[in-house]
Image (cartoon, rainbow, N blue to C red):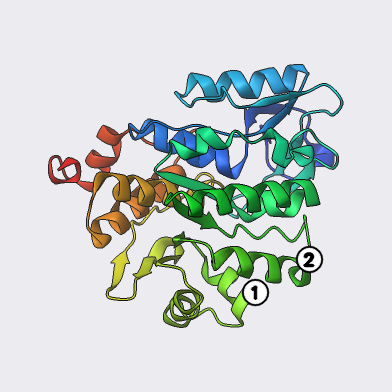
Amino acid sequence: MVLFNPDSTGPLRYVHNFSKSIAGAESNVAIALARLGHDVGWFSKLGNDEFGSYIKSIIRGEGVDVSRVVVDSENNTGLLFKERFAHVDPNVYYYRKNSAASNMTIEDLDLDYIRSAKILHVTGITLALSENTRQAVYKAVEFAKANNILVSFDPNIRLKLWSIDKARPTILDIIQMTDIVFPGKEEGKLLLGTDNPKQISEAFLNMGCKTVATKLGKEGCYITTKHQSEEVRGYTVEKPEDTVGAGDGFAAGFLSGILKGLSLRECGQLANAVGAMATLVRGDMEGFPTLDQVKKFMGIEEHIER
């Protein structure tokens, strides 16, 4: 989507000027991973309009391969507006019903392209957009699993897009096919009836997931596999500028650690750092760091690249 960020705080009825940027959970993760030095490709469907051209140009400029993006001449690119108040999370307003992205289908997937990947990352947002996008996510995940490609999944529950009664069975079904899942405590409460990180981890591991990295906000994260558990402290940001995108940064940092062969604890430390740095800058993806920047933020120079 194209994101319109208000240049002043308060209800949107009183805001007259906006800054234009881009938004989207999957594109955020792709950009964050590219900045950390990885080769990343992004699937989507954009309108044949100036907003679609803008999104494609920005993401390509960040080093992400957009060669599999489909241009839709029938539907427009989606929009998102933020409403900001001092020192609290912004409100968001979606204008994406019948957007190009919500009309993405199985036919828009290049399965051979997926076959070349080490990790396929998907989110609950695409599951929520439409029946067509839901089928496309299932097809991509099933194909990845059949070809021994790691599947990572961020539930990213958005109750403005679908009800929890509709979201819960679909998300829990996908988690059974997932290797790495990134729930938040609130999502654990919605899906499982508990916000206890240990209980969340145990439940998802019992469903077949191999690694559960539960996001705990500024407190850090709790990571569990069948054989290991790690509580990893977070980084304190006294006055975050914008918390949107922090979860996507966390996921990207964790996946970067997996790709680099880091230990579970080091993956958590990198994830916490990228997520924290995302909050330092206004905008969904503008605060994602390069590898050099995140190393300085963490106070390390060498071992993260071993």
Camera sees residue 305: yes
Residue 38 place in picture, x, y as percent: 35, 33
Q: Residues within 10 Å of mark 2 (few under 14, many from 20)?
A: few
Rounded to the nearest whole Å, what is the CA distance between mark 2 and mark 1? Answer: 11 Å
The answer to whether residue 252 is left or right of residue 165 is: left
Residue 111 place in picture, x, y as percent: 57, 37
Amino acid tagged 2: Ser
The answer to whether residue 109 is left or right of residue 47 is: left
Element under disc 2: loop
The label on residue 66 is: none
Camera sees residue 4: no
Q: Quadrant of the N terminus?
A: top right
Q: Quadrant of the C terminus?
A: top left
Q: Residues within 10 Å of mark 1 (few under 14, many from 20)?
A: some
The answer to whether residue 261 is left or right of residue 182 is: left
Tell me what residue is drawn at x 44 percent, y 33 percent. 40
Residue 145 place in picture, x, y as percent: 49, 54
Q: Viewer-proximal residue, 104 or 61? A: 104
Q: Earlier in the sequence, mark 2 or mark 1?
A: 2
Tell me what residue is drawn at x 34 percent, y 71 percent. 225
Residue 197 place in picture, x, y as percent: 44, 77
Where is 70 relative to 228, above or below?
Answer: above
Q: Viewer-proximal residue, 295 or 96? A: 96
Amino acid tagged 1: Leu
| Residue wearing tag 1 | 190
| Residue wearing tag 2 | 163
Where is 134 relative to 183, above or below?
Answer: above
Tell me what residue is drawn at x 67 percent, y 45 percent. 84
